[in-house]
């Protein structure tokens, strides 16, 4: 019983710290990285399509 209370207290503390971090703007640093990666992927795909169009127009 004591272990369950301790585990619940630990979970409550982690949740509180997580909510406090979100309020401070430090909630999800991985989101900015994901946006950057998708932007770079989009640029690479646009470059690939452009290269293919230029290759096809030369023939």
Image (tube, rainbow, N blue to C red):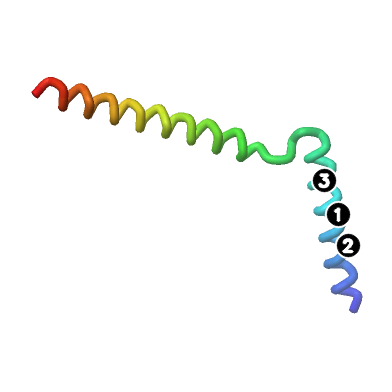
What is the CA distance from the residue labelled 1 to the residue labelled 3?
10 Å
Callouts 1 and 2 close, C-beta under 8 Å: yes
Residue 38: image x %, image y %?
Answer: 48, 35
For label 1, the residue is 13
Residue 43 is situated, as x and y percent measured from the top left of the image, at 40, 27
Residue lying at 86% horizontally and 73% vertically, measured from the top left: 3
Q: Quadrant of residue 57?
A: top left
Viewer-closest of 48 and 13:
48
Q: Quarter holding the N terminus? A: bottom right
Report how far apart the C-alphas of labels 1 and 2 lie in the structure.
6 Å
Please tell me the numbered disc located at residue 9.
Answer: 2
Query: Residue 29 location in percent, x, y?
Result: 65, 37
Neighbour class for label 1 at 10 Å: few (<14), some, many (≥20)? few
- Camera-side mark, 2 or 3: 3
User: Which type of secondary structure does the marked residue at label 1 adopt?
Assistant: helix
For this view, does 57 lie left or right of residue 49?
left
Task: Name the residue located 86 percent from the left edge and 58 percent from the top edge.
Answer: 12
Q: Residue at x 35, y 32 (%)?
A: 45
Q: Residues within 10 Å of mark 3 (few under 14, many from 20)?
A: few
Examine the rendered structure and indicate whether residue 27 appears above or below residue 48: below
Residue pointed to by mark 3? 19
Q: Are marks 2 and 3 in contact (CB under 8 Å)?
A: no
Left or right of 14? Residue 2 is: right
View extreme (left): residue: 59
Q: Is residue 7 above or below residue 48?
A: below
């Amino acid at each position: 019983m004591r272990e369950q209370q301790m585990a619940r207290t630990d979970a409550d503390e982690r949740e509180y710290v997580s909510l406090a971090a979100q309020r401070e703007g430090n909630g999800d640093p991985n989101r900015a990285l994901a946006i950057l990666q998708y932007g770079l992927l989009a640029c690479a795909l646009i470059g690939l399509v452009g290269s293919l169009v230029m290759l096809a127009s030369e023939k």
